[in-house]
Amino acid sequence: MPVTAFTRRQFLGAAALAAATPAIASTTAPARAAGDAGTGGAILVLRPTRVFKVKDRSHENTESWIVSIAVQTPGPATLEPIALDVELAKDDLVLRSAHYGKQAFAAMTYRSSFAPKLPDGREPPTPLHWPLFLRLRHTEPAAFGTNRMTVAATLRDEHGRTVAARIVVPIEIYTQATSLVFPFKGKGVVLQAGAANGGHRNRSGQFAIDAMGTDAAWSVCAPGDGKKNTDYPGWGRELIAPAAGVVVALRSDRPDQPVGDTSDPAYFAPEFRKLGGGDPGNHLVIDHGHGEYSLLAHFMAGSLRVAKGDRVAQGQVLGKLGHSGDTNAPHLHYQLQAGPDWENADALPCRFVNVNEEILDRGTYFEAR
């Protein structure tokens, strides 16, 4: 059965999976995604290592989450999906169960040539084998109170042998520890949001926001054809620290894209040019403590005012909104993540105290005070 082949840009970070059954830390107490070793020695491995549900911007009062799973086998294998069973529960109460046959299961899977790594980005001490990946998106009534999901997969290897594995995944509500302000002041609009809203799907960016600044009339572009960076009201707007912390990662050597509405690979950093995209351009990561880190990306060339190791205050000017890296227009990419390495950290949901809107989904206009 054919499966989708993902590009590195689509898969970036999501395929940096664990070498063994991963532990999942709850917001209040340790929990574990219990992956049972099934027939054929296979286990299901969870990434990101924690699954958080978020409220939907909907009159239906629903909440959504996405689970990304790798099938890990003792050695190289070619696996064919046969059947998948998914059960949702609140504590010990089963809320919903679903069985997917061969064709439906196959439609949820993909393969990738992205080299496996340990969760923190290190190379594994022994070879890891993930011949197949599975991605599940769920939207359920908030009244269900879903807090557990069980996934059982049955597959067949190239020798006709049955391979089966099962994992129990806690579904959490994240409690944000850091009080954040939106990283620019004034009016703006969200052009792309998190994975549950059809947006960013990489491991650290599942709750990320791409925001453009607008003028007083809420326009993202001045009269013209949008080919100049200066056509965009957000271009050059000051970007500020969302909270106090220490700059633990920074890059400042990238040029801006010269055409305002184009992402030209010729202006990507070399490592991203050959990988097909995903370049954050000039960017930095701030460690706020509490296991929370902010990534701000696509700064204007030459605008960064801080250096790695600097301690910054909330609201301190860091640089200017630009058009560096893989970007189709001048904008800010922001995400909260659980580690300093944006390619190998888990994504975290977040809210901003200076924005009225609780949910910043695609198409949301806002004003940061």
Image (cartoon, rainbow, N blue to C red):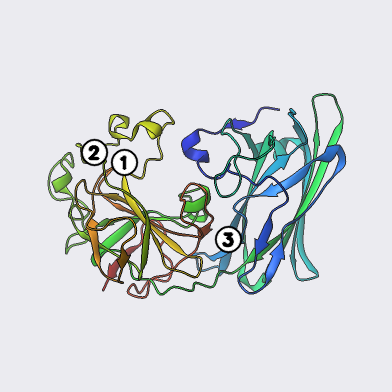
- Quadrant, the C terminus: bottom left
Residue 327 image position (x, y, % from top left): 31, 42
Residue found at the very far top of the displayed protein: 159
Q: Amino acid at mark 1?
A: Gly
Which residue position holds label 3? 64
Position of 89 with respect to 272 (left or right) is right
Q: Amino acid at mark 3?
A: Ser
Residue 41 image position (x, y, % from top left): 83, 40
Nearer the camera: disc 3 or disc 2: 2
Inter-mark Cα distance, 1 to 2: 7 Å
Which residue position holds label 1? 325
Position of 256 with respect to 172 (left or right) is left
Inter-mark Cα distance, 3 to 2: 35 Å
Which residue position holds label 2? 257
Which residue sits at x=73%, y=40%?
A: 72
Residue 347 image position (x, y, % from top left): 51, 57
Identify the secondary structure beneath mark 3. strand
